[in-house]
């Protein structure tokens, strides 16, 4: 079964690729720079393009069962407003065209879910990011809102600070203000949760927060 993967050139991307391959999926991975994926040469299909290139996005998504996206603002100097949101908008339009329904997107508590309760800790973190990294905050929030309004079978996986580490399965999943969620998550646990959502329907059209069990 083929999965399309976007935003996999960062440190988390390597974990997602390894997890998906180990679960038996074949992968079509989209990137602006194929050199960043040379480690996986021969193991994955690589499609090169930016997020405005509809033809390349179509090539990547065509024949896929689901799309996983770890796209997120990764620079302190963001020139283009809401570039991730616009890119994800293009991915959604191609998914609609090709009738690929399942989208799993990495997000953060900058996107608030109606099921969230009041949680001082996560609100304080969001306020800090809003003040210090407004463009990143705004892009993550707008991307979440765009996806949640789509007709897809979406899941927004909201994460805290990431650290390198394997998947040990020891995570908490729930809603801010209602579930005790720590402030850290290993990239291995994130990768496993993302890939598991391909077959797990529990969080379809939902935005769970996940974190390592403290
Ligand atoms: N690190 C953390 O503690 C943390 C905390 C909360 C959320 N997150 C989110 O978790 C995800 C993985 O994080 P990470 O630190 O492992 O990796 P990362 O380096 O933040 O990865 C971001 C990915 O998004 C891509 N990307 C960003 N802007 C893009 C654009 N305008 N057009 C096309 N591609 C774009 C990057 O591609 P290029 O390589 O081409 O730039 C990269 O593949 C990201 O969504 C990040 O925002 C991370």
Image (spheres, rainbow, N blue to C red):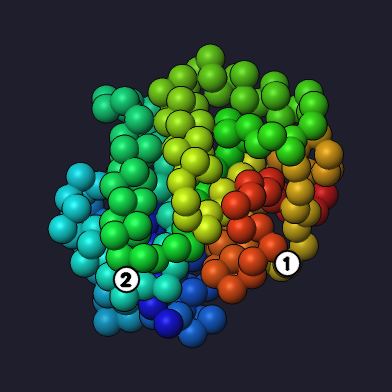
Residue 177 located left or right of residue 63:
right
Q: Is residue 65 above or below residue 53?
A: below
Cα distance, mark 2 to mark 1? Answer: 26 Å
Q: Earlier in the sequence, mark 2 or mark 1?
A: 2
Residue 202 located left or right of residue 91:
right
Residue shown at the point (51%, 81%) measured from the top left = 22
Q: Is residue 105 visible?
A: yes
Q: Quadrant location of residue 43? A: bottom left
SS class, disc 2: strand
Residue 70: percent from the left, percent from the top?
A: 45, 52
Q: Quadrant location of residue 203? A: bottom right
Residue shown at the point (54%, 19%) measured from the top left = 130
| Pointers 2 and 1 in contact (C-beta within 8 Å) | no
Label tally: 2
Q: Residue furthest top?
A: 131
Q: Which residue is mark 2?
A: 28
Q: Is residue 211 above or below residue 44?
A: above
SS class, disc 1: loop
User: Quarter for ligand 1?
Assistant: top left
Q: Is residue 192 visible?
A: no
Residue shown at the point (20%, 45%) measured from the top left = 52
Task: Say the numbered circle drawn on residue 70.
Answer: none
Residue 104: percent from the left, percent from the top?
A: 51, 57
Question: Of discs 2 and 1, which sits in the foreground?
Answer: 2
Residue 86: percent from the left, percent from the top?
A: 31, 38
Q: Which residue is mark 1?
A: 169
Residue 58: percent from the left, percent from the top?
A: 23, 62
Q: Quadrant of the N terminus?
A: bottom left
């Amino acid at each position: 079964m083929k999965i399309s993967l976007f935003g996999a050139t960062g440190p988390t991307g390597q974990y997602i690729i390894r997890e998906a391959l180990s679960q038996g999926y074949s992968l079509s991975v989209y990137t602006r720079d194929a050199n960043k994926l040379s480690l996986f040469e021969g193991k994955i299909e690589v499609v090169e393009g930016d997020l405005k290139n509809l033809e390349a996005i179509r090539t990547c998504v065509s024949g896929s069962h689901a799309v996983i996206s770890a796209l997120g603002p990764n620079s302190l100097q963001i020139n283009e407003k809401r570039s991730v949101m616009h890119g994800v908008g293009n991915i959604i339009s191609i998914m609609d065209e090709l009738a690929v329904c399942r989208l799993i997107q990495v997000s953060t508590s900058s996107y608030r879910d109606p099921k969230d309760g009041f949680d001082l800790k996560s609100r304080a973190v969001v306020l800090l990011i809003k003040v210090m990294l407004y463009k990143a905050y705004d892009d993550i929030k707008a991307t979440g809102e765009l996806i949640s309004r789509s007709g897809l079978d979406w899941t927004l996986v909201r994460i805290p600070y990431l650290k390198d580490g394997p998947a040990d399965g020891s995570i908490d999943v729930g809603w801010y203000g209602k579930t005790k969620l720590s402030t850290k998550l290993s990239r291995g646990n994130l990768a496993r949760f993302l890939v598991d959502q391909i077959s797990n329907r529990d969080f379809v059209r939902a935005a769970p927060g996940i974190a390592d069990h403290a």
